[in-house]
Image (spheres, helix red, strand yellow):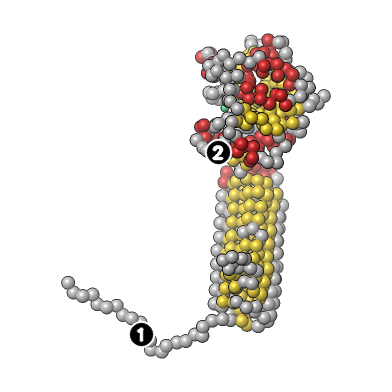
Amino acid sequence: MTARLEIVVLAAGQGTRMKSDLPKVLHPLAGRPLLGHVIATAGALCPARTHVVYGHGGERVLTRFPDANVLWVEQAERLGTGHAVMQAMPGVDDAAVVLVLYGDVPLVPTDLLQPLVAAATTGALAILTVELANPKGYGRILRNEQGAVLGIVEEKDASDAQRGIREGNTGILAAPAHRLRAWLAALKNSNAQGEYYLTDVVAMAVAENLPVVAHCAQDEDDVLGVNDKLQLAHLERVYQRRQAERLMREGVTLLDPARFDLRGTLECGCDVTIDVGVVIEGHVKLGDRVTVGAHCCLRDVELGAGTQLRPMSVLEEALVGPDCRIGPFARLRPGTVLAGHAHVGNFVELKNAQVGEGSKVNHLSYVGDTVMGRDVNVGAGTITCNYDGANKHRTVIGDRAFIGSDSQLVAPVEIGADATIGAGSTVTRDAPAGDLTLSRAPQKSIAGWKRPVKKPKAAG
Ligand code: UD1
Ligand code: CA
């Protein structure tokens, strides 16, 4: 039987220990806000509705997720986890099963949540627990001699003996909505923190002789929350390690999985090799046999089969064909499109530029707002002057043109096919196809010229 599922995500925490201006659930893990991970996990469970409880002044949280398919509920006063869930309950259907998640617990896998939902569907209260080496700060799970769950005691309310219990409460639970509604209405705040504890519903279910099911998570990292920057960094590493392991299982060679960061999605062909210190953001697609050199940064990039990206190159929103050679120290900015077999060398910046098949821009150049044909050779230090201080202009370079080193192409300008531009030229008018165009002061030599000599220093 599958009941209607409604998910409540608690995200009203201030996150004081993050020591940050940014609300805690907006801190990024692998480039995505913590809450974004949780909303995605919720979505994967296909709920009828997801409610996110945000805190007073938490409009920044709302506006960060304009497209999320969730209902936002404000908790005006932060009176405890039970109180937080209560804020969402008016919008929850009585016939539903409610699953409570936390906006600051980003890595919980759906296969830990499905059994909770299944148990709640049969009428039970289901909680997710975890065996902890150091349970400090956690609510402890109280069980009788037969092992049946009796309740949860918060650390601040626990006796010394209870603090010795190593089974901790993750906070995540599932319950039939109508029961949860009744329990929440009956919560008291007579405890050490003066809060309405969600955890108190467990003892209520036990008192009503309702089944309470506890599932124990095997991997602590799956259920860890983020309270400070150390925990955030820990979970970042956990997440990155898991992604790296998945990629290696898919056949990607990572020269050091501990020095690889994926903040988005990566699609790889066969025999892709990625060297150390590479950062990948957005959506990146690497064709067969692509090699990515050390310390490259790629965002929203596609590299064709056989392309070699050499170290220290930075690529954003670029589309690269097969068998290209890029870098070291190349920068491809948005709108760069390279056809196959193109070469882009060191200290070359391309922006909104199409580079044709087999063309080469090998050293110290800036090429922007340009359409370049095939087999063009752009000499070292060539600059397209695409900006007149107000508007951008286009440069067109025909097939097989040869641009001598240290030339400036002042746009709008067109270099014809097979044209040659003499080194050091400033090209301000179109250069005809096939011809040599150059603009340079004539060279002269002054015979017998003497270098100045240094004057002797005055004595004393
Ligand atoms: C809670 C649990 C504890 C569990 C621990 C796991 C309770 C009473 N205790 O304790 O058993 O071991 O989590 O980390 O539930 N929140 C709100 N509004 C509130 C209070 C909290 O939205 O009024 C949110 C917080 O943003 C946070 C989560 O609920 O995401 C947990 O709150 P927190 O104060 O961290 O609870 P703990 O004391 O850690
Ligand atoms: Ca906490």
Q: Residue at x 63, y 68 (%)?
A: 393
Disc 2 element: loop
Give the quadrant of the C terminus: bottom left
Q: Which amino acid type corresponds to the residue marked 1 in the rendered image?
A: Lys
Q: Residue at x 70, y 41 (%)?
A: 67
Give the quadrant of the N terminus: top right
Instruction: Please indicate whether residue 406 sits to the left or right of residue 112 in the image.
Output: left
First in sequence, mark 1 or 2: give its number. Answer: 2
Quarter holding residue 5: top right
| Residue 19 in sight here | yes
Residue at the extreme bottom: 447
Q: Would you say the beta carbon of the disc 1 residue lies within 8 angstroms of ligand 1?
A: no
The residue wearing badge 2 is 22
Identify the mark at residue 450; answer none if there is no mark.
1
Q: Nearer the viewer, mark 1 or mark 2?
A: 2
| Residue 118 in sight here | no
